[in-house]
Amino acid sequence: MRKRDMLLLLGAILAVTAIVITQFTHSALETGAWGLSFRQDNTAPIGPASVEELSRYQAAYLGDTQKKVIYLTFDAGYENGCTEKILDALKKHNAPAAFFLVGNYMEKNADLVRRMVNEGHIVGNHTMHHYDMSKLDSLEAFSKELTDLEALFQQITGKELPKYYRPPQGTYSQNNLVMARDLGYRTVFWSLAYVDWNNDAQPTAEQAYAKLLPRIHNGAVVLLHSTSATNAQIMDDLLTKWEEMGYTFGSVDALFGQ
C-alpha cells in the first residue's frame, strides 16, 4: 500500500473513531435526580452534567460565572398564601423571576398567574401533573404533559407559554432532554437550592440564610419554592443582602442568549 493510501486510511479510521467517541460521550448522560456538589463558599457547584454537556440539549443550570448576576426561579405545585408577598418583594427590588407552575396551580390561581405575567416574570412549564417525567419514554406522553399546560396558560392569559421547562423533582433522562429540546423547550435546572419545600418543617430565617448566603455565586440559578412561609418572610431582606454583596438579578432568558 502506498504511503498516500495509508494516510488516507488512517485518517478515515481516526474520523470513525472520533464519531464513536462523540456518540459515546453524548450517551453518557444518565437518568437521575439533579444534585449538586459544593466546593467552597461563593463558588459555583459541580452538577451531575456539565454546562457544555447540557448545552447540547438546550439545557442549563448555571449562568456566566464571570458576572455577579443571580437568576431567581420558583417552583409551585399549589398555593398556600405566600406568593403575593414574594411577588411584592420582587417588585420592590425590580427582580425578574421565573415561576415554574403545574396544572393544579394554574387552575386554582389564575389571578396570581396573570399577576406574574403582568409584572414581567416568566411562567415556565413544570408539567400538567408533576409526574416523574423520566418514566415517560414516548414523545406523545411527554409532549402531552407540556402541551396541556400550554393550553391552560393560553386560556388564562391569552398568551403563549414561554418555552422553559423544569423537570418535576429535578428528575430527568437524556431522552427527556432530547424530547424537550425537539419540542422547542429550554430545560432549566439550578445551581443553588435548600430544603424549603417541607411545610411541616420550615427552616428558620437564620437556617435559610446559612444556606443561601455562603453558597450564592456568580451566575447562580436559584431554586426556591413559593409555597415556603420562610421564603415569603425573608424575601425582601434576602434580596437586599444579595444586593449588598454586589449581585444583580437577571432573567433566565439570558441563560440561553436571549
Image (tube, rainbow, N blue to C red):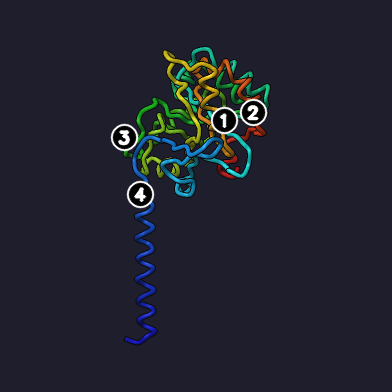
Residue type pointed to by label 1: Leu
For label 4, the residue is: 28
Q: What residue do we see at 54% from left, 15% from top?
A: 82
What residue is at 67 percent from the left and 27 percent from the top?
Answer: 94
| Disc nearer the start of the sequence (2/1) | 1
Asked if the residue under mark 4 is in contact with the one under mark 1, i.e. CB atoms within 8 Å, the reply is no
Residue at the front extreme of this rendering: 40
Secondary element under disc 4, as helix, strand or loop, is loop
Q: Which residue is mark 1?
A: 72
Q: Amino acid at mark 3?
A: Lys
Q: Quadrant of the N terminus?
A: bottom left
Residue drawn at 48 percent across, 25 percent down: 75
Q: Dot 2 corresponds to which residue?
A: 95
For residue 120, side relative to residue 81 (left or right)? right
Q: Cα distance, mark 3 to mark 2? A: 35 Å
Q: Position of residue 223 (x, y in %)?
A: 50, 29
Mark 3, residue position? 135
From this view, report whether residue 66 is shown above or below residue 98. Answer: below
Q: Label 1, label 3: how many angstroms apart (C-alpha)?
A: 28 Å
Judge the density around disc 3: few (<14), some (14-19), many (≥20) Cα neighbours within 10 Å. some
Q: Amino acid at mark 2?
A: Ala
**Image point 35% across, 49% down: which residue?**
28
- What SS does tag 2 mark? loop
Q: Is residue 74 above or below residue 177?
A: above
From the viewer's perspective, tell me whether residue 56 is left or right of residue 85.
Answer: left
Task: Please tell me which residue lies in front, 214 or 160.
Answer: 214
Tell which circle, 4 or 2, labels the residue nearer the N-terminal end. Answer: 4
From the image, which quarter does the C terminus lie in?
top right
